[in-house]
Amino acid sequence: FSAHCVFRKTKALLDHTNTLSLNLTELTDQQKEFQEVARKFAREEIVPAAPSYDKSGEYPFPLIKRAWELGLMNGHIPEDCGGMGLGIFDACLITEELAFGCTGVQTAIEANSLGQMPVIIAGNDAQKKKYLGRMTEEPLMCAYCVTEPGAGSDVAGIKTRAVKKGDEYVVNGQKMWITNGGKANWYFLLARTDPDPKCSASKAFTGFIVEADTPGVQPGRKELNMGQRCSDTRGITFEDVRIPKENVLIGEGAGFKIAMGAFDKTRPPVAAGATGLAQRALEEATKYALERKTFGKFIAEHQAVSFLLAEMAMKVELARMAYQRAAWEVDQGRRNTYYASIAKAYAGDIANQCATDAVQIFGGNGFNSEYPVEKLMRDAKIYQIYEGTAQIQRLIISREHLGKFKQ
Amino acid sequence: CFAPFLCLRPPQIRVKPDRTGVVTDGVKHSMNPFCEIAVEEAVKLKEKKLVKEVVAVSCGPQQVQETIRTALAMGADRGIHVEVSGKDYETLGPLQVSKIFAALAKKEQADLIILGKQAIDDDCNQTGQMTAALLDWPQGTFASEVTLEADKLKVVREIDGGLETIKIKLPAVVTADLRLNTPRYATLPNIMKAKKKKIVNVKPADLGVDVSSRLEVLKVDEPPQRQSGVKVETVHDLVEKLKEAGRI
């Protein structure tokens, strides 16, 4: 199946996205209002709480619950499952604002979208009502379980096995780096159903929905990472886990395409998150540069610093335009793989550059944990790794680009 | 009902070159914070089933509709936009607004008018009081607590000396002070639902109100620039300097 035939334009989409042409300069009234709520919440509630969550690594459930109450989470869930059926563009606007507050909090929230996306694009009505419906009734978390200790970029190399036994599949294997691994109510799981090594990736894997309390599902310890430390990342062991056949998405062998198809919709929000971090870096650095003096002037008045700020501004604006384009393309029902990869690759790279430059502008203070920018540097790194590494994005972009060229 | 949307204090307030007022172009406009508190109180009363309907009112140009939408997203049932724009809007003051509110209150047969105690751009603190006077209704201003008791309203007011509790008969005017409540966020689902709620456009002339101002602003000046200070070495020097400046 091709990615765009499973996208259905929801009513919400038709109401409020820029339908005919992409207008990057003027959001609709509703988009502005959504953005306002997300911005206010991020700046008033996430920003003050983020440093202590970063130090303790504690899961920011109070903030997540608040975001859920305000309707800032689970935006993609279709209206007939109790959600708002938001397009990717609107979701990205919200994501950028939340990420400005703290990308650790925002990643915990975003992992819900990633886990839900396979169900949204490939689930049947019963699966959608059951697993998406419950997310709108209480603030539950879910997770996307694909990566393994031995296979990250090479998804086709995963070894977790699902064997059909009667009306069930029995799963054995090991997953790693699963965001919300210890907090999820259910997982989207990718496992190999065809043991034949010659079987192609497009037929060998199956996507499942797994209830987290199924016997045999064993989340590991919370991993201590460089950044986004309040996000819950774990290894998960699957030992003789039984999954009913009703929980297979589409059918045996359809898993790989579903897992990859989800990315076209989740990469733009991840790019938006990286942009939010870069925006935060720019704002913190600008504020500081207008307060700190050296050699008789505010450091912002020294060209070395103002040029750094100018380049940060350039990068932030371009990253924003890139994710908006990628989001808009997929909302129009078009295949956006090229744009989504460009947005994610670029935003991940510039987030790291802007965070580093912000620390530089803060000087010695920037290196210190009492100032907000060292956290941004530690948080930014993962944007070049998860949701497809910077290198994988370049593989995708070159393949798409050369493919277009040859036509 | 609540007072017009006003300028959110921008980081740098600048006086217009012709000194007739402050620069408002490009300044973000949103709901007056005290009016947000008023809207919240009205919505709370409706949730407690003590009032049937909450109508949000604002006077001003087209952009005012955004503010009304925010009130609808917070829980108001419908909106009334009293169109005042251009020169009329620049000279619109508390007296004209009170006349508009009084006329609307009669037309809508309102039982309670709640608005912010004052707008944070002009700090007039007059609209609520004038509206009550025009309607000959009792008023509970600077409210930090409002309770409905049968057909009377118990209002705890913040006054200079502390708190004053009064009982007023309905219909009445109440103005909201800071500690009355904490306004809720408009949630995203409520923002979407608010789009279906009606906002009606009305002109002051339709209400029989003349918005021309009887005040003429002669000039607006910035406060005097803060002079740089002088450092002195000893207390003796300080006393000498103060004497020189005629301060002691």
Image (spheres, coloured by chain):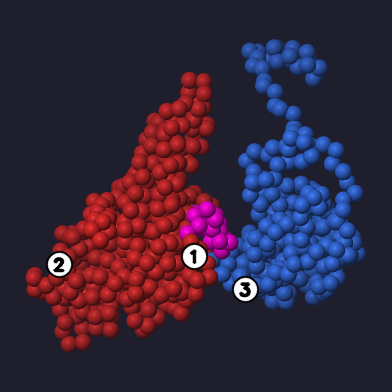
Provide the residue designation for mark 2: A159
- Residue annotated with mark 3: B196
The residue range painted magenta reads A22-42
Judged left or right of residue A369, residue A197 is left
Which of the chains bears the disc numbered 1? Answer: A
Mark 2 vs mark 3: in front: 3
Q: Is residue A311 left or right of residue A165?
A: right
Q: Amino acid at mark 2?
A: Lys
Q: Mark 2 — on which chain does it sit?
A: A
Chain shaded red: A
Circle 3 or circle 1, nearest the eye? 1
Residue at the far bottom in the pictured view: A166
Does the rendering let one see residue B243?
yes
x and y percentages locating residue B212 in the rendered image:
87, 53
Q: Secondary structure at mark 3?
A: loop
Quadrant in which the C terminus of chain A is drawn: bottom left
The numbered mark at residue A20 is 1
Residue B165 seen in the current view: no
Q: Of the residues shown, which amino acid type is indicated by label 1?
A: Leu
Percent coordinates x, y for residue A399 in the rendering: 23, 57
Q: Position of residue B214 (x, y in %)?
A: 90, 49
Q: Helix, strand or loop at disc 2? A: loop
Q: Residue at x 70, y 12 (%)?
A: B236
Discs 2 and 1 share one subunit: yes
Q: Estimate the spatial distance between the alpha carbons at disc 2 and disc 1, rounded to whole Å.
A: 45 Å
Q: Which chain is blue?
A: B
A235 or A299, which is in the foreground?
Answer: A299
Q: Amino acid at mark 3?
A: Lys
Q: Report crowding for label 3: few under 14, some 14 to 19, many 20 or more residues within 10 A (C-alpha).
A: few
Q: Label 3: chain?
A: B
Task: Please say if B217 is above or below A178.
Answer: above
Residue displayed at 34% across by 58% down:
A340
